[in-house]
Each structure stands twice: as C-alpha cells, then as structure tokens.
Image (cartoon, rainbow, N blue to C red):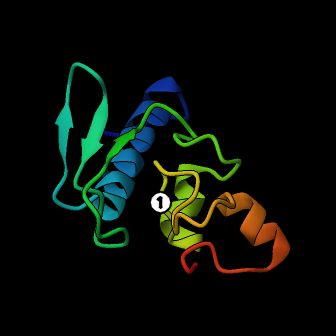
Amino acid sequence: MHLQNSFLTFLVIGFVLGFLTSSYFFNDVSTDELSGNLRGISADYSQTEFLNYLRADEDEDGLTNHFELMVSKTSPVNADSDGDGISDSEELSLGTDPNTK
C-alpha cells in the first residue's frame, strides 16, 4: 500500500513514533485507565510513583516531566526530589544538585 502525503500518512507516522517512543521511555508500565496515571516509571527513574501522562509538569515545579525523567533525573511527581525544602527548578537555577541534600 502506498501512502500519499496526506492526513492518513500523518496519523500512521504519529502512531508508529508514539508507540516507539512510549515503549522506549516507559518500560514495564501499567496504566490506570480511569485516572490516566502511569505506574512503574522506566529504569531511568527507579522509584515506583504515579505520573499523570496527560500533564506536562505533574509536580508543578517548572520542569517538564520529560526533562525530569531524562535530563535531571529528578522526581516528576515531587517538586523537591531530595526533600531539602528547595524545589528542583530552584536548585538547578542555583547550580546545586536537586537530588542531593
């Protein structure tokens, strides 16, 4: 089947890319279909916590969930990953490690 440059092509490519990236970033994940929460975030974030995948910044600390999972390795559901009273985004702007007290 030959796909023309059309909306169908866009949908197929979007579906394939979405499937590949979600399976890459979220290994061994189950979904609570009623609330849209992911359980068992990938090996990049070892703790089992809940992440609403419909929100870009679940903990509202100014860092996107993707940035926290892939770059800063901080908790996407806890604004202060190390519990020192300073938010992850504040610590990054100050040049301190948001994962260490």
* Outermost residue toward the top in this view: 34
Looking at the picture, how far across and down is residue 63, in whole percent?
Answer: 66, 53
Image-based side of 23 in relation to 64, left or right: left
Quick one: quadrant of the N terminus? top left
Looking at the picture, how far across and down is residue 15, in whole percent?
Answer: 36, 39
The residue located at (29%, 23%) in the rendering is: 35
Looking at the picture, how far across and down is residue 54, in whole percent?
Answer: 45, 31
Quick one: quadrant of the C terminus? bottom right
Q: Nearer the viewer, residue 72 or 86?
A: 86
Q: Is residue 10 above or below residue 63?
A: above
Q: Is residue 54 above or below residue 62?
A: above
Image-based side of 61 in relation to 33, left or right: right
For mark 1, give the secondary structure.
loop
Image-based side of 19 in relation to 68, left or right: left
Q: Is residue 76 above or below residue 71?
A: above
Q: Nearer the viewer, residue 51 or 85?
A: 85
In terms of image quadrants, where is residue 86?
bottom right
The residue located at (55%, 43%) in the rendering is: 59
Q: How many marks?
A: 1
The residue located at (66%, 47%) in the rendering is: 61
For mark 1, what is the residue? 75
The residue located at (77%, 61%) in the rendering is: 90
